[in-house]
Image (cartoon, helix red, strand yellow):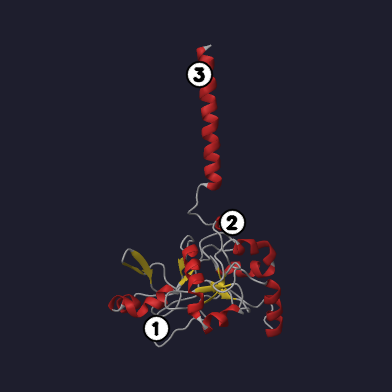
Amino acid sequence: MIRLILGTVFGSVLLVGLGLRSLEAQHGHGDHDHGGHAAEVATPNCAVMDEPANLALSVATDDGPVYFCCKGCIPKFQKDPAKYATKVAAQRKALAKRAKVQVTCPVTKEPVDRKVSIERDGETVYLCCKGCVGKYERDPAKYATALANSYTYQTTCPVMGEAINPKVSTVLSTGETIYYCCKGCDKPLRKNPAKYNKNLVSQGILVNWAEVKKADNEEGHGDEHGAHGHGDHDHGDHGHGDHDHGHGG
């Protein structure tokens, strides 16, 4: 009888343990952001309206980007930024809970090379090439604003759910920048946005695909867009023509 009771208790404990492991396998990896998990963190509100902000729609400021729900809010903010200081502070407090990825070099504003970085004040700062390391280290304050605006809150590819590659992105005809893990992911997203859009929404990236299609047709681009990386980045006057930044993964 004692053996029977002990066996029953042991079996129950084992089942409970297995159940907990199963739950951990499904929900326990909060630091692995594969699209849907990002929905657990509420999207912060727009700096102007009490509406969820679009984390693909922002303006750069000295303290980092400020996000909005629609383009109409941007001129209102720019006309009187001080008026919205409280909302901006609340937005940044909410964003502090989200994962982010540095995608542009603070020196050239080109896509970063994840193999080139320095540690400063406990933070890893990525650069686009070794030539930028010395420039940044000599005068980090000069690049503070660029660094503050060098991040994206889209951390995973909407198609594959893998970590984004800062060198692989496309700018939609409506202005949003979408990042991917590899070049091949742009085409399936454009071909069937309804299938993958939820993975963008879960990361706070809100795209009106009807407007994208309309704008594409008006510009005559159709499906010719491709993931390119840094065609639209500002190279400034830093002269990195001899550096191979590439477009690949």
Give the mark toward the camera: 1 or 3: 3
Q: Which mark is residue 6?
A: 3
Can residue 167 be seen here? The reply is no
Question: Hey, which quadrant is residue 161 in on the image?
Answer: bottom right
Q: Please determine whether, in this image, residue 123 is positioned above or below residue 76.
A: above
Task: Indicate the position of residue 165 as horizontal and vertical percent values.
Answer: 49, 67
* Labels 2 and 3: the sequence-earlier one: 3
Query: Real-space Cα distance between discs 1 and 3?
Result: 72 Å
Binning the other alpha carbons within 10 Å of mark 2 as few (below 14), some (14 to 19) or many (20 upward) gives some
Q: Alpha carbon of mark 2 to alpha carbon of mark 3: how far?
A: 42 Å
Q: Amino acid at mark 1?
A: His
Identify residue type, mark 2.
Gly
Name the residue carrying label 1.
240
Q: Residue furthest top?
A: 1
Residue 8 visible in the snapshot: yes
Picture layout, residue 33 above or below residue 212: above
**Gap in Å between the C-alphas at discs 1 and 2?**
38 Å
Name the amino acid type tagged 3: Leu
SS label for mark 3: helix
Query: Disc 2 on helix, strand or loop?
Result: helix
Q: Residue at x 51, y 28 (%)?
A: 13
Q: How many marks?
A: 3
Q: Which residue is mark 2?
A: 36
Q: Position of residue 77 (x, y in %)?
A: 54, 79
Q: Is residue 131 left or right of residue 54?
A: left
Residue plotted at (53% across, 17% down)? 5
